[in-house]
Amino acid sequence: MKNNRFVWIIALVLIFFAASSAHLRGLVKDIPSIHILDDYTPSLVTKVYDFRGNIITELFTERRTLTPLKDIPIDLQNAILSIEDNDFFKHWGISPKGITRAAINNALKHRGLQGGSTITQQLAKAIFLTPERTFNRKIKELLLTVQLEHNFTKEEILQYYLNQIYFGSGAYGVEAASRIYFSKHTKDLNLAECAMIAGLPRAPNYYSPLNNPERALARRATVLRKMRELKYITEEEEKQANAFPIETQKVGIPVGLGAYFIEYVRLQLEPKYGNQMIYKGGLSIHTTLDIQAQLAAEKAMGEGLTAFDSERIPFFELKKSTPTSVQGSLIALDPKTGAIRAMVGGRSFKESQFNRATSAKRQPGSSFKPIIYTAAIENGFSPVSVLDDRPMIFVNDGRDWRLSSRTTDFLSTLPPEDLKDPMKVWVPENYNNKYFGSVLLRSALEHSLNMCSIQLLDAVGPARAIEYARKMGISSPLTNTLSLALGSSDVTLLEMTRAMSVLASGGIATEPYAITRVEDKNGRVLEENLPREQEALSPQTSFIMTHLLTGVVKRGTGVAARALGRPCAGKTGTTNDFTDAWFVGFTPQLAAGVWVGYDDRTQLGNKNTGGRISCPIWTNFMRDALVNEQVMNFTPPDGIVFTLVDPKTGLLALSKTPGAYLEAFTKGAEPKDFYAKPEEDLPIPEENINVVPNETIDDGSVEGGF
C-alpha cells in the first residue's frame, strides 16, 4: 500500500514539472524579441514649425523626444538611480534585496503596494508588455529582464529607460518632461529640477508639480535625501536644492493655435506618409505659417464675429449667453511666393472642423469684379473710360440673353408671367437702386456699380473674362453668363485671395502652399517645396488695377481699411440677399481675404455688407500682422505714366481744375485731349460725366452685388 502511494506521489511530481516545463516553453514562445531594441524606435513627437522656425504645435500619441545618455545631466541619472534602483550597476536585472525590502514595507505599512522592480524590469514592462497584473505576465517580465541584461550594457538600458518611461502630463522620456514642466531642454536642468523629474515615474500625476506642488516638493526632498545618503551630492547641495522654488512653466504654444492650418497640412501629408508616421514618426514639418500673423488672424476674427453678435442679438438674449452660429474665415498669402501665412477656417475648430477658408464655396458678390475689370483693362479699357450706369433689362430670346432696354418703363410692356420667370427676364440692380448715368471706370469700381460691371463683361465677353479668372487662380466652375459680373458663381476664399494676390505681385500667379520641408527623425529630407509661379498678367495691367483698387479704400466701399494707415488696395463683396460678406485686399507684402456668413445661408441683415463687417476684420488683422513690417508703397513698373485728369470727363486737366488727380495709364493709352484748352478756363457743360458723391459710401452703403 505504501509503495503504491509513493509511486503516485512521484507520478504527480513528474506531471507537475512536465506541465510547468510545457507552460514555461509556451510563455517563452510568446515573449517578444528584445532585438527590436537594436533599432530602438519608440513613438516620437512630430513637430510642426512656422516659417521662422518657431514650434506651432506637436503631433503625437506619446510626447517624446529621443535624447542620448551623454546629453542627460549626471545629476538626473543619479537621481533616477537613487530613487528607483540604487543597485542598478550591481544586480543582474532582478534585485532580491529590492524585492525583500518592498515586501517588508508593504507588510508593515498596510497601504499602497511598493514595487520591487528594477529599472530593467520597468523597461521590460514599458516596452514589451501590457499593464495587466497576472502571474504569466510577471514570468514574462522576469524572462525579458534577464535577456535585456544579457544583450545590452547598463548604459544602454539606462538610456532606453530615460527615453521610454512616462513622467505625467503627456510627457514620455526626460526631454519631454523637461520641456513640459520647466520649458527647457534636459541638458539645462539644475539639481533641484533633476530631483523633481526623477520623483515622477512612481506616481506621475500624484507628484506632479503642476497639479500638486506640495507633494512634488516632498517627493523632491525624498529624492535629494537618497542622493545624499548614496554620496551623489553633499549635504550643502541638498540644502540648496531643497530651497530652490518650484518654477514650472509650460512651453508657450497657445492651445489650438492654427488648428485649421494644422489640419490642412495633415490632410496633405497623410496620403504620403500615413497617420502612424505623422503621429509616431518624429517628423519635422516646416510650414509657411507666420505665428504672429496667425495670432492676429484669430484675434481679429474672434473680435469681429463677437462684435457682429453684439449688434445682431438683443440685449436680453446676450444676458442668456445664447449661442450663435455666424461663421467667418480668413486666409493670408505672401503674394510673391504663394506661402500661406495665416488661416482661420471657422469660428471654432473644436465645434466645427470644416475649413471655410479652403473648402466652402460661396458667391463672392462684388469682390469678383476686379477680375472683370482686369479683363477689361487688358482689352482696351482705361481708368477713364466712360461707362453708362443706367438700369438694364435683359430678355431671354430662347437662345441667349439680350439687352432690351435701359429704362424700367420697358417692364410694363412684358407679360406678367414673364416678369416672374427669372429664366425669361433679368433685371439687375445697383445697391439701393441708385444710378448715376455716365461715370468713369474708376468711379464705377470704387463704388461697385453693378450696371457698369455688366457693361464691361458684355463688352469683353464672359468666356474671355473666365480665361482671366483661370489665369488668376480661380478653378471653380464659372457661369458663362453676364451674371458673372456680379459674382454669381460659387468660389472659395482661398481662390479669391489667390486671384487678388496676382495684382499685388505685379501679374505673377503663384500656387498657394503650406509645407516647405518635411524631415524624418534623423533629419533626412523627405520632401521640399519651392514656390511655383507663372506670369498671368502684364505688370502694367496689374499696377493699373492696384491703383484703381486703392481708390476703393480711399473713397469707395472699402473706406474702413483706411484705418490701416499704410498703402493698401482691396474690394468688398456682398451678395444681394445679404448672406455673404467679403473683403479681399492686399499691401505690397501681404494679400488677405475675409468672409463672414452663416453656413445655412441665413441673411446677415440689411446693410451688413462686406464693407461694414468683413473689411474691419481685414483691417485689424493686417494692422497686427504687419506691425513689424516696413510701410511700403506700390511701385509702378516701366511702361506706366501718370497724367493729370479731370474727375468729371477723364480728359486731360489743368493744374487749376477742381478735383484734378493723377491717374495711371499704360504708356500710349493716356488721354490726348484737354477738357478745356490750356489758355482757356471754360465752364463745365450741363451734360457732364457724373462723379459719385463720396458722402454716400462712408459705411459701404453703395455696395453692389448679385
Image (cartoon, helix red, strand yellow):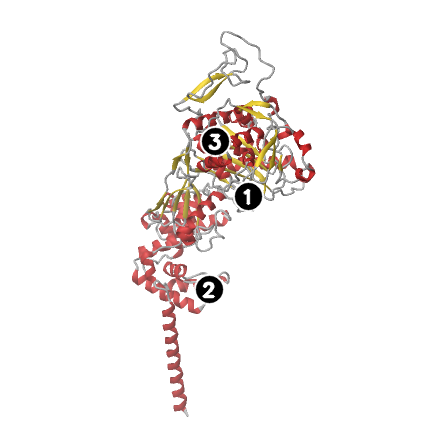
N-terminal of the pair, mark 1 or mark 3, is 1
> The N terminus lies in which quarter of the figure?
bottom left
Is residue 434 among the parts visible in the rendering? yes
Looking at the rendered structure, the kind of residue marked 3 is: Ala
**Distance between the alpha carbons at the discs numbered 2 and 3:** 71 Å
- Percent position (x, y) of residue 225? 41, 51
Q: Is residue 381 above or below residue 474?
A: above
Q: Badge 3 is on which residue? A: 375
Residue in the foreground of this view, choosing between 658 and 204: 658
Q: Residue at x 57, y 13 (%)?
A: 684
Q: Badge 1 is on which residue? A: 348
Callout 2: SS: loop
* Label 1 Cα crowd, 10 Å radius (few <14 / some 14-19 / many 20+): some
Q: Badge 2 is on which residue? A: 132
* Label 2 Cα crowd, 10 Å radius (few <14 / some 14-19 / many 20+): few
- Percent position (x, y) of residue 408? 65, 30
Disc number lying in front (2 or 1): 1
**Distance between the alpha carbons at the discs numbered 2 and 1:** 39 Å
Residue in the foreground of this view, choosing between 547 and 286: 547
